[in-house]
Image: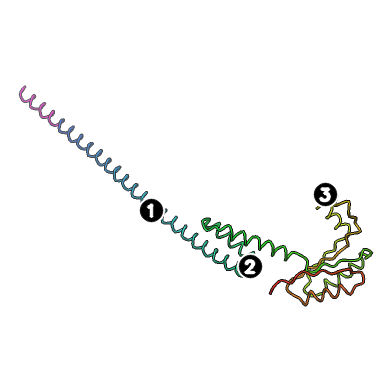
Amino acid sequence: MSVSFELSQDKSSVHAQAQQYYLLDFLSSLLNNEAMVKQHSTIHKKKLTRHVTFVLIVLVVLAVLILKTISDKKLLEANHDLSDHQYSDAVKNYNLAFLLWPFNRNPDEIEQAKIAANAIRQYESSPFLIIFLNSNTSRQSSQQLQNEIEAIPGVTQTIYTSSQTTYDKYKEQNKDKPELLNLVTVDLFPASLEVKVSQRNNKALQDKIYNVAKGKSFVSNVVRSPISPQ
């Protein structure tokens, strides 16, 4: 009976040890699988990162090439505008070209275009004619002349400037030169009419306005602006 009990205990011990062994083996297998999953996930993340980086690099290169291409095109257009004396358009295209690709900058070309564009703007904003009036001209007479000139097709605006307004402008411009202010009085500055038109290269229109103005007894002088080239 004692021998049988001992054998039974031995079997139970062996069975328990076997269960512990299988349990440890199972846990070890789980840990190994988890480590493999983590390793696989890390490798996958690295590959994904490389792919994303590559795609981003390609997109950046493409964007740079596109900007460079557009900039070169605008630079060619600016040079063409400059050769055609389209200075305002040249400045716009130069600025856009340099904005897209600063390495294309040519300070001499853009400065030349800006100077020319400013000169053109000043010319286009200047009066087509300036009509100077005698000192005793009434505002009613000058207003009648304005109405007559504004009725001429092609005239967009007439601007009346009184003697006092002209004198005040002179004083403002020379406020730091009292020696000049002491030499003039308001009666030295005649009232005037500035005439602006829609097309500055219209010689016939300029002649017509000139003849209308010179036909008035209260007009002392008419100054023509140079006709822009066709």
Q: Position of residue 153 (x, y in %)?
A: 79, 75
Is residue 8 shown in magenta? yes
The range drawn in magenta is: 1-15
Disc 1 residue type?
Phe
Find residue 15 and name its label: none
The answer to whether residue 199 is visible is: no
Q: CA distance from mark 2 to mark 1?
A: 44 Å
Picture coordinates of residue 170, whole percent (x, y): 83, 55
Q: Residue 156 lies in what quarter of the image?
A: bottom right
Residue 147 in sight: yes
Would residue 162 be counted in the magenta stretch?
no
The image quadrant that residue 195 belongs to is bottom right
Total numbered labels: 3
The amino acid sitting under disc 3 is Lys
Q: Residues within 10 Å of mark 2 (few under 14, many from 20)?
A: some
Residue assigned mark 3: 177
* Residue that carries the numbered disc 2 in the rendered image: 86
SS for dot 2: loop
Report the residue at 60% width, 66% height from top: 82
Disc assigned to residue 54: 1
Q: CA distance from mark 3 to mark 2?
A: 39 Å
Where's the C terminus, which quadrant?
bottom right
Q: Please tell me which residue lies in front, 187 or 153.
A: 187
